[in-house]
Image (spheres, coloured by chain):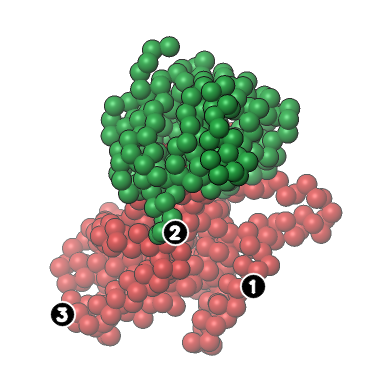
Chain colours: A green, B red
Amino acid sequence: MTAEVLLRLTDVTKRFGGLVAVDDLTFEVQRGQIKAIIGPNGAGKTTAFNLITGVYALDEGEIEVAGKRASRLPSHEVASFGVARTFQNVQLFGNMSILENVMVGAHTRAKSGLLSASLRLPAMRSEEVALAERARECLRLVGLDKLAPEMPALSLAFGQQRLLEVARALAAEPLLVLLDEPAAGLSTAETARLGELVENIRELGVTVLLVDHDMDLVMQISDEVLVLDHGVKIAEGTPREVQRDPRVIAAYLGEEP
Amino acid sequence: MRVRSKRYHQLAAAAAAAAVLPLVLPSEYAIHLAVVIGINAIVALGLNLLMGYAGQVSLGQAAFVGIGAYASAILSVKAGLSPWIGLAAGAALGGLTAAVVGGPLLKLRGHYLAMGTLGFGMIVQIVMVQWEDLTEGTIGVMGIPPFSVAGLALDSELRMYYLVAASAVLAIALAGNVIDSRVGRAMRAVHGSEVAAATSGVDTARYKLQVFIMSGAMAGFAGSLHAHHAAYVHPDSFGFHYSIQLVVMVVLGGMASIWGAVFGAGAVTLIGEQLRSFQEFSTIIFGAVLVAVMVFMPAGLWRGSADLIGRLLGSRGAGGRRRA
């Protein structure tokens, strides 16, 4: 693995009123890694994701993606740098089909506009065919290719909805994908398949940063784990190192270090 | 792809039906109503793109119709230009106005957007009344000439009908094409989940503005058709009452349904004709219809009644018609 930094957060701070949700957070994700952020509820994990993807504006610090400054940019520009994500509370497009949901994920991979769409120009039509093909490929990757692609997205079972979000994120052919609690609400068997899927995603050359509470999953698939507590990084290292860290144990068991 | 060819078949069937419709209509008045329905359908299609698909409410859509109508009226009566130039100008000015006011307005969400567009509609109507040098104030612009094709004036209901019907079919095709495209998916994604749309790379502000401009241009186009059909324009035609009627067309027909918008335009136009004698009370009746449809048939009359018929026939599988 080449030690090339894909994502770098430097002294990132986010406050909500008096609450410091993310406090002076600095970390890196290397290209090709699977890295996990763990921590108790309210530790600032999802906030960190929202800062990286431009959903929230940060108060202090810098975020870089592949050497380009990504902080203080709107979400769609961060996405164009090759960052895709899923959501803890599933955010599918309920008014669209399975296939169309994934095709939106490939939005940055195409460029036809209002005029070529209105007139259905040939370039736009061939682009549509390519987008649909790309979307089917992503559905195959997450194992949703047996379903009728024109079914409404919200007709899927909950676990399948999570997988559909992963397919949508992959459709962008991202450099980095952020998975926010992908295993939440999944059965043991589904979680095991998710672990394989995440490893497959890495095989495709996509770097993965994930947040999850399922320690078995996190410790098994991650190269590195970062632990947050009250917005502060309290540990970072291999799964083995982190599990032995007294501050991590204290944070999880509620003792004062 | 099957969905797409089905759409073109439906369109061809609708065009054929529209072509023979005047033969079965009983009177000149019935054809007149069909023209009004066609004009309203074009506005409702545009508003449905904005509201039903992109999820952005407009309570000021009548203003764009008025802008198109006045542009066409003033250009043809005062400047003596061809009504066809007026038609192009009406659509362009509708779109341009939407582009200018859409920037600040579309930053608002939900009820605030509704209030903002409501205020915009009122301002436009006040301008129509007060800018007397241009608009003739409360008298309105009279004596607007009809369209003419190769020397043949479209001065009868039947001739005007064919222009409007062709325009409406074109608008249906256009709306369908846009929805079923990268742009259309981006617009619908904004409605489905704005945050997921943005993190998928969709510039949400840009697509909201595009759909707003498109709805404004379609309304302006329809306004011009109205001006040359009615032969006069008056500020009262483009007020809050008409804006509400347009919203009712979209909701009644079924949000995010192209044929629903056409159906809604027909239903509301015909109901409006029946309610003429009630004058101001007709707004109350429209309001009541709107509430009743929202409560009992949230998918609109079109799909709502199809589901109801399906249930009455005992075929529970009829719920399969999700997209018209």
Identify the element where label 1 is drawn: helix
Real-space Cα separation, disc 3 to disc 2, in angstroms? 35 Å
Number of residues whose C-alpha sits closer than 10 Å to that of mark 2, classed few (under 14), some (14–19) or many (20 or more): many
Residue at 52%, 15% in the rendered image: A203
| Amino acid type, mark 3 | Asp
Identify the residue shown where x is 41% and y is 20%.
A31
| CA separation in Å, label 2 and label 1 | 21 Å
The three-letter code of the residue at mark 2 reads Gln
The residue labelled by disc 1 is B292
Question: Element under label 3?
Answer: helix
* Residue position for label 3: B133
Q: Chain of mark 3?
A: B
Task: Name the quarter where the N terminus of chain A is drawn.
Answer: top left
Residue B23: numbered disc: none
Chain designation of label 2: B
Seen from the viewer's position, the closer of residues B73 and A236 is A236
Q: Residues within 10 Å of mark 3 (few under 14, many from 20)?
A: few
